[in-house]
Image (cartoon, helix red, strand yellow):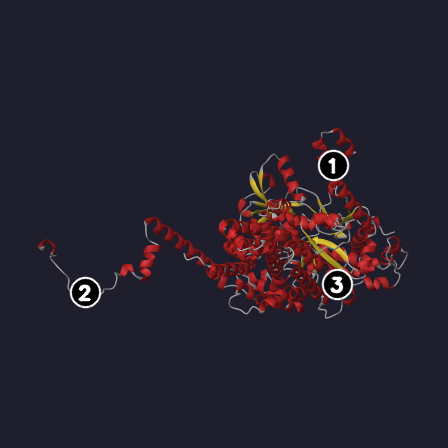
Amino acid sequence: MSRNTPAFVRSRMLPESPPPVADTGAIRWLRENLFSSVGNTILTLVSAYVVVRILFWAAPWFFNGIWDSPSLSACREMLDGRTGACFAVLTERWNQLLYGFKYPSELYWRPTLAFVLLFVAIAPVLFIKYLPRQMLVFTGLYPFIAYWLIWGGSVTVPVFALVGVLAGAVVYRRVLTVSAGVAVLAGIIAAMVVWWAAGRVTASMEGVFALEPVASRDMGGFMINLMLGVICVSLSLPFGILLALGRRSSMPIIKWICVMFIEFIRGVPLITLLFVANVVLAYFLPPGTNFDLILRVIIMITMFASAYIAEVIRGGLAALPRGQYEAADSLGLDYAQAMQFVILPQALKISIPGIVNVAVGLFKDTTLVSIISIFDIVGMIRGPILASTEWNGVYWELYGFAALLFFITCYGISQYSQWLERQLQTDHR
Amino acid sequence: MANKTAFRKSDNQEEVNMNKTVFLGALTVAGLAAGASAAATLDDVKARGKLNCGVNTGLVGFAAPDANGVWEGFDVVVCRAVAAAVLGDANAVEFVPTTAKTRFTALSSGEVDLLSRNTTWTFSRDTDLKFDFVGVNYYDGQGFLVPKALGVSSAKELDGATVCIQTGTTTELNLADFFRSNNISYEPVPIETNAEGQQQYLAGACDAYTTDASGLASTRAAFENPGDHVILPEIISKEPLGPLVRHGDNDWGDIVRWTLNALITAEELGITSANVAELASARGSNPEINRLLGTEGDLGAMIGLDNEWARRAIAAVGNYGEVFEKNIGEKTPIGLSRGLNAQWTNGGLLYAPPFR
């Protein structure tokens, strides 16, 4: 027994001592993250050098910046040889960068108001758990309000458009008990009938509650990028869902139409589609028809985005275990119900990162419209502003401003999507 | 014809040809329809109350909107003069900005009535593309801009150089011709707009930047240190830039041609925007001034306008010399001298046919 008796038994706990200095706080963090090995140390030093160099170069450029000057040459005179930016171009041309050079300046409040209302409209969609559901009514009304604010004209046009949509929705609801496909078709036909009838009436009611109309070709700047981004992403989601479901459908005609559409669009560069929208369509439309250029571009970008989103959602659908489909069937749900209540909520959740990826990419792709002489923010910079005698030669300030606007928007979108993923997380990883 | 040959070929081939025929047929129909509407451009413009004029999306001194969104520039003036002559209002112009790639489709599809966009008059554009160049408003030529530090004094020393070049323009082809005929090599750096070219050149992406000499001068004027860059003496091409219209409507072409000639003649005759009202108030001693300003004869009626058309155009924009000085002349930052663009009486090439 004595073999098992230890030679020494501590009878009292040692007092807690602080960890060694090199293993706490900032020093530990530095050691572990920046100087953990020779290679890392070298990389850290090199990066630090680069960062400091950039700061030394950029700081005077930024802080010496001239904010008030009539032209680039005046800017250079004021700087008198020092390094410094000429932000005066932004203070003088900010309105052109944001709204384009032809949007009437006394009407700037209209797109601005539409922009502010956009947040009110998407908030209930984005934060559906935290805001009252009644706010979704405003979301439904928003497209018509925004159209009226931005394009102006008689209020009857958006009102009748809304009536058409409502009529379609009512018919859809009524027929839904018969069959989902027939209901969609009937809904579309009902909406078309209302619009056709409204088209005859609105012509005589041009002056009713009219805002001053603004033509599409008078719009430009960051406004165009935002408009194209918001409209095309929100339109391409439903189309993308339909295409994804169509591609997985067991009905061969629907399936092949969807497959051909998706593969064709994905096989063609966006810029080609934009050129088609701009120049080729002009040959085939009867002369004199004025098919709004922005509408053409919206259609093309929406088609493009739908194809990509369809593939993302198809990935989500494919990732669902077969058991989910079978479970829905065994509950006696029909196809529409099964999709609506069981399959799509799960599939869309899986697809969020992909959808956001497409949305962010698409938003940035909207700058491509500058090639077909639409003056979006990049078009404004490349064309009119850099071609003016005052500002010919200012690059960093202008492109930096554009980059800043895009960064704010895209970073916001990506932060939201990460938050949403955390909210929807139901598996217990 | 295409159909007939197709019958003799294999089925596959036939299908291809048929498709082609259908496609071409559709194109022809579209073209015919466009041609039919083009036949009365003047009526269209009058009915619309606005002239649709294709301009550059932005070229310093030639076309650019100012801080208030009003289009200004040497090419823009042609649009305004035509609008003043036809519609009586120099502001009744819908400017349609076009890029080098979209300009010709914009004109041939009927989207614009007139293209005034520093476009070089060439054989194939005039004939094959079915346009009519109505004259020349600027005689240009292609040159090279290089940094002084490169130590080059002639374009022939540019062997192996990287050259920034705008795609879709005649300059691209001239460059290839020049280097091939001198048996030297180059590497093109394709760019889309002048602004981009400027940037790439300053960033050192290319050793030399080539475009029309007027463009080089304005580009250099915008540099922080213009003295560090030289324009090489070689002018490697003829670039007569002028406004153009579609084939098939000669009446409309005449109006644009003679509006441009009126501005040029006005300078030759000493008519300016300041004295045009006075000269037109009564018949003067110079019969050509009288005919031009409509106090004598009825030249206006011959082109389907009233007799005051030229008076309005000159009053609205000034004569050619005034336009030049205001937009691109030596007092502007662009600082171009008249050179080839002086009147023939001053040793230049401007020579408007007589108004008779």
> What residue is drawn where x is 68% and y is 42%?
B237
The residue carrying pointer 1 sits among few (fewer than 14), some (14 to 19) or many (20 or more) residues within 10 Å by Cα, namely some
Q: The disc labelled 1 sits on which kind of residue?
A: Met
- Marked residue chain, label 2: A
Of the residues under marks 3 and 2, which one precedes in the sequence? 2
Q: Amino acid at mark 3?
A: Ala
Is residue B61 visible in the rendered structure shown here? no
Q: CA distance from mark 1 to mark 3?
A: 42 Å
Q: Secondary structure at mark 3?
A: helix
Query: Of helix, strand and loop, which one carries label 1?
Result: helix
Are dots 3 and 2 in contact, CB under 8 Å?
Answer: no
- Report if the CB atoms under discs 1 and 3 are less than 8 Å apart: no
Towards the viewer: A334 or A285: A334
Q: Which residue is identified by label 3?
A: A198
**x and y percentages locating residue A417 in the rendered image:** 50, 59
Q: Residue A171: where, in percent of width, then height?
A: 68, 61
Q: Nearer the viewer, residue A322 or A424?
A: A322
Q: CA distance from mark 3 to mark 2?
A: 88 Å
Distance from the alpha carbon under mark 1 to that under mark 2: 97 Å
Same-subunit check for callouts 1 and 3: no
Q: Quadrant of the N terminus of chain B?
A: top right
Residue at the extreme right of the image, as rendered? B297
**In the rendered image, residues at marks 3 and 2 fall on the same chain:** yes
- Where is residue B141? Give x, y as percent: 68, 45
Is residue B147 found left or right of A294 in the rendered image? left
Is residue A13 visible in the rendered image? The answer is yes
Residue under numbered circle 2: A13
Quadrant housing residue B91: bottom right
Three-letter amino acid code of the residue under disc 2: Met
> Which numbered disc, 1 or 3, marks the residue closer to the eye?
3
Residue tagged 1: B18
